[in-house]
Image (cartoon, rainbow, N blue to C red):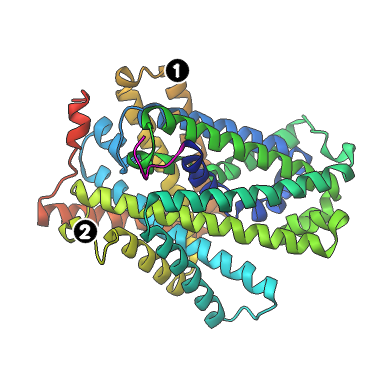
Amino acid sequence: MGKGKLSLWEATAIAVGIIIGASIFSLIGVGAEIAGRDLPLAFIISSLAAILVAYSYAKLGSRIISNAGPIEFVVRGLGDNIVTGMLAFMLWFTYVASIALFAKTFAGYFLALIGAPLSRINIAVVEVVIVAIFTALNFRGSKTVGRAESIIVGIKLAILGFFVLAGIWGINPSWISPAFDHKHLMGAVYAATIFFLSYTGFGLVTNASEDIEDPERNVPRAIYLSLLITTIVYVSVAIVAIGSLPLTELVRAKEYALAEAARPVLGRAGFVLVGIGALFSTSSAINATLYGGANIAYALAREGELPEVFERKSWFGAPEGLYATAIIGLLLAFLLNLDGVAAVCSATFIIIYIAVILSHYRLRSLTRGNPVVILLSLVVVIAILILLLYHQYLTNPRSFYTIITSYAGATLVEYFYRRKTGRTIRLRIAAKRDGFY
């Protein structure tokens, strides 16, 4: 049990921190509009889909210990090629972009709570301060990150738990009874494809596997525990939300639906409580994402995917990937319209899932994975990707074309980068010694 290693709860807290980012506060209203009173059912369906994907991450993560996480899995299963390199870069970029998204969300909630105007300068100042705080925290190492995440996630879960316990007594049972007719079931399934993205983050555990105590046992446990905890939270909050307000009112207030659902029991204090919960949620997400992004940057540099300058152990005593991840994340927050960036992030997570599942199928003899479960998860995730792209094409063509051009651009960059440098993604020697190759 190495000193400074993450415990099982700390590893789980890191995953929970990024899964329950700001999504629970923004998705309830949108989900109510799509799924109606079947909203809790939609969260359960999306959780089952996430568990199918988690099966491959848990099996591979228990055998392949690398902070490169899914990229290490993909290189082992599908080999080193332009597509693998492109996915490696896009995964790191997704973590960087997620920092921008979380920082902007934090700034919005914080300024609203203190009654300050949402000016560009105010938003920028808050973004810089919150990212700087958690960059400094990450500077102190994985154990400090894990302890901080445990505390922040504990507070966040306590706030959401209080919301559930306070609101459950005022639930109208007729508002939460599910409907199983074709229209409502299709709404639940469609909402589930959207909510599936709210469970992304459990894979971050594999990007910390080198820093976790007894990773062969605790990586799978942390993955499944994080999904269990978040499923309970999502379903409980959904039940209280739709049971506390008429559906029309919940949909009308979809931008702040959770705060509105807290009003019948807690009044104005409910808005403040939800706002504070959102601040803790986005804080823990920033902390976890910085940690994961820095780990990926260093692991990929070590294994040959990023430029050689990134292979230096540290700048001023901290991993260079930490600085790069934080600074580029802030630049994205300052300079870009993040709607298209968010769409690229969503697509990247799903495409990485597909690549990991394909890799697991090829490595199933090493993990003793069940081929039926692996293939079922592959079918489910491909269907979700198709629905996501189709939805983007119909509702937001600009985001759809941003996804396509981002992947085309990343593939071209990877092609010319490899031709110029001749670098490849290397397998870790420790994994070879452990009998994988």
Q: Which mark is residue 310?
A: 2
The residue lying furthest to the front in this view is 3
Q: Nearer the viewer, residue 263 or 386?
A: 263
State which region is magenta: 1-7
282 with respect to 168 (left or right) = left
Q: Residue at x 40, y 71 (%)?
A: 331
Residue 38: x and y, percent? 75, 37
Q: Which kind of residue does numbered mark 1 sit on?
A: Val
161 with respect to 265 (left or right) = left
Task: Report the quarter where the N terminus lies.
Answer: top left
Q: CA distance from mark 2 to mark 1?
A: 40 Å
Residue 165: x and y, percent? 79, 44
87 with respect to 311 (left or right) = right
250 is within the stretch colored magenta: no
3 is within the stretch colored magenta: yes
Q: Residue at x 18, y 29 (%)?
A: 432
Task: Report the quarter where the C terminus lies.
Answer: top left
Whether residue 390 is visible: no
Q: Which kind of residue does numbered mark 2 sit on?
A: Phe
Which secondary structure type mostly characterizes the magenta part of the structure?
loop
Instruction: Answer above or below: position of 212 versus 403.
Output: above
Instruction: Answer above or below: position of 233 versus 420.
Output: above
Q: Nearer the viewer, residue 250 or 307?
A: 307
Residue 54: x and y, percent? 47, 32
Q: Which mark is residue 372?
A: 1
